[in-house]
Amino acid sequence: MIPPVQVSPLIKFTRYSALLMGMIYGKKRYDYLKPIAEEERRVEAEEKKKREELERIAKELAEGNRAHYLSSAAALCAPKVPSHGLQALCVHRPVARARKGSPSCPCV
Amino acid sequence: MAQAAQRLGQRLAARGPQLLSAAVAYSKPRLATFWYYAKVELAPPTPGEIPKAIDSMKGLVRSFQTGRLAQLTVKEALRNGLVATEVLMWFYIGEIIGKRGLIGYNV
């Protein structure tokens, strides 16, 4: 086996000081980034909650509108099934089908 | 996929000790050679070597000042560049150790 190379002390010294510097830099940067990331997560969770709240309200409004629409349509088309779901819109008595093109009946 | 993993696990458990001893027998001489070289080449500087390192650094600075830089051959320059790159990589390895994660900061 070839004998090991005698590394110059300068290189050894710089190597290990670079290693130490790297460790210190890594630790310092980690400690700096950690609270920032936690803050971000907290803000993100709050925003998400607010957004979900708004979406819930919007959905309720939409449901309310649709219920109103369906109920008014039900008055004209007289569906035989409970009035939620798009199928309800299309189910109506055969007599109503004769009224084709009638603007007030949304089923045809 | 899960079945294949299960069968692999069973085979490992059945032949575990044998595999372990085989691995140890394979790696022992190689680890020995590694240790033989690492003891000399990768060892940290002893306290007695630090003044020598500082002297070499001063010599470097002086050679920069006297313009010996122009007399470097390309081969030497490349070699020095490689050594400097290797020293730089030790910094990044230190950073990996400091941030306790291989890729990215796990915050």
Image (cartoon, rainbow, N blue to C red):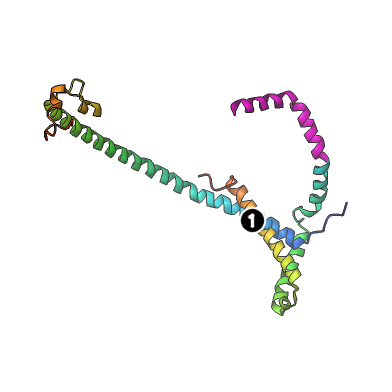
Residue A93, quarter of picture? top left
Residue drawn at 66 percent across, 56 percent down? B89
The count of marks equals 1
Chain part drawn in magenta? B1-28
Please tell me whether residue A98 belongs to the stretch shown in magenta: no
Is residue B94 left or right of B77 when viewed as pictured? left
Residue drawn at 53 percent across, 49 percent down? A30
Amino acid residing under circle 1: Phe
Q: Is mark 1 on a helix, strand or loop?
A: helix
- As drawn, the residue found furthest toward the top would be A80
- Give percent across and percent down for residue B104: 55, 48
**Observer-nearest of A95 and B41:** A95
- Tell me the chain of label 1: B
**Observer-nearest of A38 and B47:** A38
- Give percent across and percent down for residue A60: 23, 33
**Observer-nearest of A21 and B102:** B102
Is residue A94 left or right of B26 when viewed as pictured? left
Q: Can residue A85 be seen in this view?
A: no
Q: In this view, does A47 lie above or below B93?
A: above
Q: Identify the residue under disc 1.
A: B91
Please tell me whether residue B9 belongs to the stretch shown in magenta: yes
- Give percent across and percent down for residue B61: 70, 72
- Give percent across and percent down for residue A14: 70, 60
Residue drawn at 72 percent across, 71 percent down? B60
